[in-house]
Amino acid sequence: MVHLILFIIFGVICVAGAVNLLAQKHPINSALSLVVVMGALAGLYLLLGAEFLAAIQVIVYAGAIMVLFVFVIMLLNAGEEEHTHGSKIALLFGVPGMVVGSVLIAWMLIHSQPSAREVTVGQLYGSARSIGQLLFGQFLLPFEITSVLILIAIMGAVVLARRESQ
Amino acid sequence: MSIGTYLIVAIVKIVVFLFVLLTGVAYTVWLERKVVGHIQNRWGPTRVGPFGLLQPLADGLKFIFKEDLTPPYVHKFLYILAPMLSLITALISISLIPVGNTIPIAGYNIPIQITDTNISLLIILGVTSIGVYGVALAGWSSNSKYSMLGSLRASAQMISYEVALGLSLVGVLMLTGSFSLRRIVEHQAGWFWHWNIIEGGQIVAFFIYLCAAYAETNRIPFDLPEAETELVAGYHTEYSSMKFAMFFMAEYANMVTVACLASILFLGGYSGPTFAGFLPPILSSLLPIFWFLVRVVFFLFVYIWVRGTLPRFRYDQLMAFSWKFLLPLSLANVMITGLVVALRA
């Protein structure tokens, strides 16, 4: 019962933050709404028993990546954005697309195996030990490939940033 | 223990911890003014009370009665939110610090710590990383170039040093195999050669941690975000009265947390001789608190000592020190510690 109440609270905060992110005119308000979404997601992870993931979510996403976002917004001194009145194409294709997409996901969830759609509290591999064993055992190859991919991205960024102007 | 007693015990502990922490913060300021005064051949505060001991009280009263100015053209909501965020995140961390062993009261063995979780250390890291927003938003929302530059420097510096700080803790975590601070202290129980800094061989990690922690708390020699000769007061230039005091308290509370963590992770936390059997049980269960406080005060003194001694880094030196020196060193420490742990197992 307590878990359900907490789930609803975190879920509402999460969705409200996401809606606010889109509705706000100033980029810094949007970035802060995203921080709220990240925090609420961490709460949801914690409810599932994925304590390590929850802490990492806060440290990495809310604490480091979003600080970089805010940093860049401050550095560029980005002002308020002007809202356009919305394009007809977005209205014509976007809204029906969204409806179809959410119906599809709901349909798949309802008709899938019970094990795939229901997660009880504490069922996930939450501890640092089990996540480490998964990452460096079963999923070693994807993990290493991701690392190399990120390394390439970092090197690309450095090369682009340090290009000598002739 | 029923839920009622549990709640009462928790509330009492929270009140006591916060009271002690805030008093400690006030007297750290007094200690700093006194010690830096003596380093510079001055007396420091002497007028209010014996040895100027009531100076923090006078300062607090002054802060409360000062006019609370809000400069024009600030981003009102964030301007008010920023000091709150700083102080709240600074105070949350203390709830996970184990100050002593258990204390026997009315048949219950109550641990001297607000709460213990199995991800305590990660929670503290997460909370402090949220604290960066307080500093960043303060500078941005004040609509002043000095504040803005201060908070730009602060966010860049804190992100850079968080990496080295986090990696310097990995060695200790590998030795203990737990994120719980109480487990980490229990792992080092016994005489001083069982401490992580000696038996665990984490002396390099200890110095990385100290450097990174000084940078995280914006203290000299890493105090570029509030370099008074260049930026007036940095990110809190436009704040006055209690809002300024909140930033001030947050900074010193963070110092206390860093000192607590350093003692727990590297110097055995509250471990020390308890003379169980010679002393009455209540006294021997309170003795660990004393040993813990000795370490914390020592670290606070070193903080102040460094402040009175070292000059400030240049900005490029600051960044190079973190990325080119501390980061490789901490990675090497992780690898070597991992190797030793693996070979021993």
Image: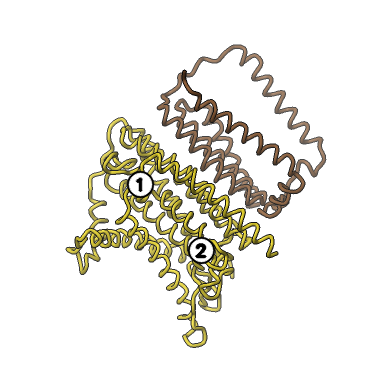
Front in this rendered view, residue B126 or B337: B337
Disc 2 to disc 1: CB gap under 8 Å:
no
- Give a yes or no on whether discs 2 and 1 share a subunit: yes
Front in this rendered view, residue B290 or B273: B273
Residue at 44% x, 57% y is B258
Left or right position of A112 against A75: right
Q: x, y (%) of residue A81?
A: 45, 21
Which residue was labeled with disc 2?
A: B266
Quarter of the figure with residue B260: bottom left
Chain letter of the residue beneath label 2 in the structure image: B
Residue at 43% x, 60% y is B259
A145 w.r.t. B218: above or below? above
Evaluate whether residue B29 shows in this view. Answer: yes
Secondary structure at badge 2 equals helix
Q: x, y (%) of residue A140?
A: 73, 44
Which residue was labeled with disc 1?
A: B223
Left or right position of B75 against A16: left
Amino acid marked by disc 2: Phe
